[in-house]
Image (cartoon, rainbow, N blue to C red):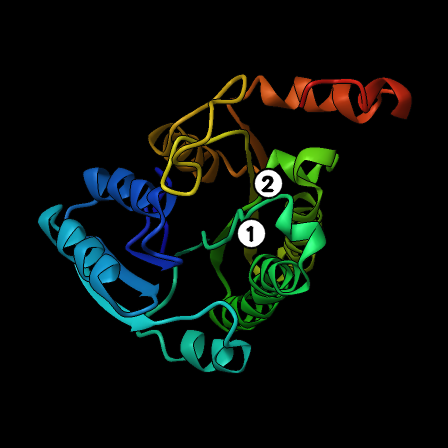
Amino acid sequence: MINALGIPQHLLLLGGTSDIALAIADAYAAKSPGLTVTLAARPGARRDAAAEHLTGKGCVVTAVDFDAVDTATHSTLIEGVTGDIDIAAVAFGLLGDPELAWTDLETARELAAVNYVGAVTTGVALGARIRTQGHGVVVAMSSVAGERPRRSNFVYGSTKAGMDAFYTGLGEALRETGGRVLVVRPGFVRSKMTEGLDDAPLATTPEAVAEAVVNAVRDGKEQIWVPGTMRAVMSGLRHLPRGVFRRLPI
């Protein structure tokens, strides 16, 4: 169970090799010695390194195989996690090449399969687990890119828009069963996913996202933007006339 200070005993990381997922685990490990972490990711050197890193932080780590596109396995995987899941971080996703994403069918399919379809099937399985437990928080890593998709990355933005809508609705559905969903909408995060790209305005870090997540779970929030100023920025952008919006250098 999550205690009165918002600290879990058991953290499930779906996409557990991502920089944000590991930063969230680090943040909780610093507050909860002996934190149990189920690290769900594809097997390989990155997962091994992540497990070693978290073990070094004092976590009790169990690594399990997870592939976002292998949707038939999602329910079995989540049903098989030992012990109650206090917090499940849905932290997997692809950014992709934005130009290939709308001109190459396979690139578009892969983005949709990982960022939306895989996120939905994972969310359905998590919802079933939380209904059985009667408690639990899902932390869904969305993006400001989904709030108003831009020409520069509209395929990615569309997948995040769908994912965001699903998890927002899942939060409403789980309220009556004791579960919660926190939808997290970061801006540009300096991470492996964005390596080689120029920083966007209000760029942030995985550690800053993790700190915001920990605080939001503790405070019972349902939606956050990281950094917080992104909320006002995106509110303004959503209401700009299309002709003005398309002239912005974003």
Q: Amino acid at mark 1?
A: Arg
The answer, for residue 150, to whether it is visible in the render is no
**Left or right of 244 in this view: 87:** left
Name the spot of residue 143 as percent of width and height, x first.
Answer: 59, 39
Residues at badges 1 and 2 in contact (C-beta under 8 Å)?
Answer: yes
Vertical placement of residue 34 versus 205, above or below: below
Callout 2 crowding tier (Cα within 10 Å): few <14, some 14–19, many ≥20: some
Q: Nearer the viewer, residue 178 or 250?
A: 250
Name the spot of residue 145 as percent of width and height, x first.
Answer: 64, 36
The answer, for residue 153, to whether it is visible in the render is yes
* Location of residue 112 (image quadrant): bottom right
Which numbered dot is residue 156? none
Callout 1 crowding tier (Cα within 10 Å): few <14, some 14–19, many ≥20: many
- Mark 1 → mark 2, Cα distance in angstroms: 8 Å
Q: Amino acid at mark 2?
A: Glu
Name the spot of residue 222 as percent of width and height, x first.
Answer: 59, 40
Residue at numbered disc 1: 180
Q: Which residue: 71% across, 48% down?
A: 158
* Location of residue 223 (image quadrant): top right
Secondary-structure class at tag 2: loop
Q: Earlier in the sequence, mark 1 or mark 2?
A: 1
Vertical placement of residue 98 versus 199, above or below: below
**Left or right of 64 in this view: 219:** right
**Left or right of 145 in this view: 137:** left
Q: Nearer the viewer, residue 210 or 18?
A: 18
Q: Number of numbered discs present? A: 2
Residue at numbered disc 2: 222
* Location of residue 195 (image quadrant): top left
Of the 4 image quadrants, the one containing the C terminus is top right
Of the 4 image quadrants, the one containing the N terminus is bottom left
